Image (cartoon, coloured by chain):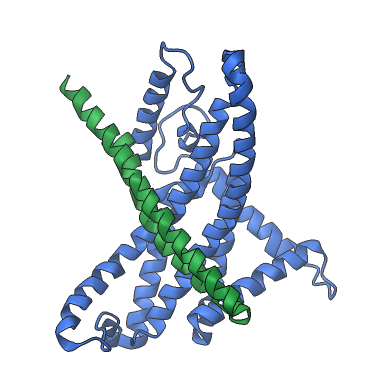
Amino acid sequence: MEGDIVQMGAYIGAGLACMGMGGAAMGVGNVAGNFLAGALRNPSAAGGQTATLFIGIAFAEALGIFSFLVALLLMFAV
Amino acid sequence: MRPAGAATKGRRMATEAQGSEGGGLVFHPMDQFMVKPLFGDGAVGMFTLTNVTLWMVLAVAATFALLVLGTSKREIVPGRTQSIAELAYDFIRKMVEDVAGKDALPFFPYIMTLFMFIVFANFLGLLPMAFTTTSHIAVTAVLAMLVFVTVTVVGFVRHGAGFLSLFWVSSAPLPLRPVLALIEVISYFVRPVSHSIRLAGNMMAGHAVVKVFAAFAPMIALSVGVGILVTPLSILAITAIYALEVLVAFIQAYVFTILTCVYLRDALHPHH
């Protein structure tokens, strides 16, 4: 009985942790959207900034991956 | 992380999911990440040959085939393999030069090695029945720790104690600097964590999604009514996600290398 409640809590927590992915989605969309907005205004400067774009996306995405990791830990390691 | 323990727990959950109620998944989406010995069914020890070993060796062999065998003829008008090898070489060399600066070029062979290994491990992992070595944090953590240790050592060798000025943001107002220094130190030590988890998490998540849809695909065998709707949809979804995964496999290798370049730049030019 007690173990069941703990496991239920772990599963609910895993589901809640996945909400963090929504934040990462907004962050990545924000980075890419702003890059596109800037690139369309000044297309000649866009090519040199793709590396910066990917670094920005990687940093924003890392936090979503952290929430995914928390969900995985709750599912398989706790 | 305890891959073996997590895997057995995953297996137990997989059998539970198949349980009495109909319509459960045919296999568990995490089963594909299980580390198994190549020969026999014994326990996985320190020197056991496992599927991880096999696919890492294949990644190294693929790199060797592309870069050494592909360029062995040294044609003036390059063939297909040689052009791809030259393309990869130029791509990484330009990245190192642009992001980390000209004085980072002595580290180009290391960064090239990292990129080729990760990109081939990712792409080989996309083959059906293959094992994605980069989906295990144990593998990516070693790569990230190597980068972290290299960068820290290079920073201290080049600048001595001056390397610590990386944490002292001299452009900020004086009262803020200790606070910023604390944040900078924390973010410096979180680097290997995020560096490794980004790669492993991306690969694991993508492959798990493919397997979830793959488990829904044989639904038509269980019940024709629901299956006629679910099966074509999930096959379409597998195709779409797989295409995305091909892109992600390359982009994650690219991101891993470019972040290595960024960290290297910080070590070579620590002054804000």
Q: Residue at x 23, y 32 (%)?
A: A9
Image hue for chain B: blue
Q: Residue at x 56, y 65 (%)?
A: B113
Q: Residue at x 51, y 28 (%)?
A: B40
Q: Residue furthest right?
A: B77
Left or right: B154 as drawn, with respect to A45: left
User: Which chain is represented by green in the image?
Assistant: A
Is residue B42 visible from the viewing direction of this image? yes
Number of dots carrying numbers: 0
Along the line of sight, the residue nearer the viewer: A40 or A16: A40
Q: Give the quarter of the figure containing the C terminus of chain B.
A: bottom left
Q: Position of residue B217 (x, y in %)?
A: 59, 26
Q: Give the quarter of the figure containing the N terminus of chain B.
A: top left
Q: Position of residue B46 (x, y in %)?
A: 40, 43
Left or right: B98 as drawn, with respect to B197: right
Q: Position of residue B21 (x, y in %)?
A: 42, 12
Along the line of sight, the residue nearer the viewer: B65 or B1: B1
Q: Using the image, determine if residue B11 lies above or below residue B206.
A: above
Q: Using the image, determine if residue B211 lies above or below residue B199.
A: above
Q: Position of residue B82 (x, y in %)?
A: 76, 66
Q: Residue furthest top?
A: B20
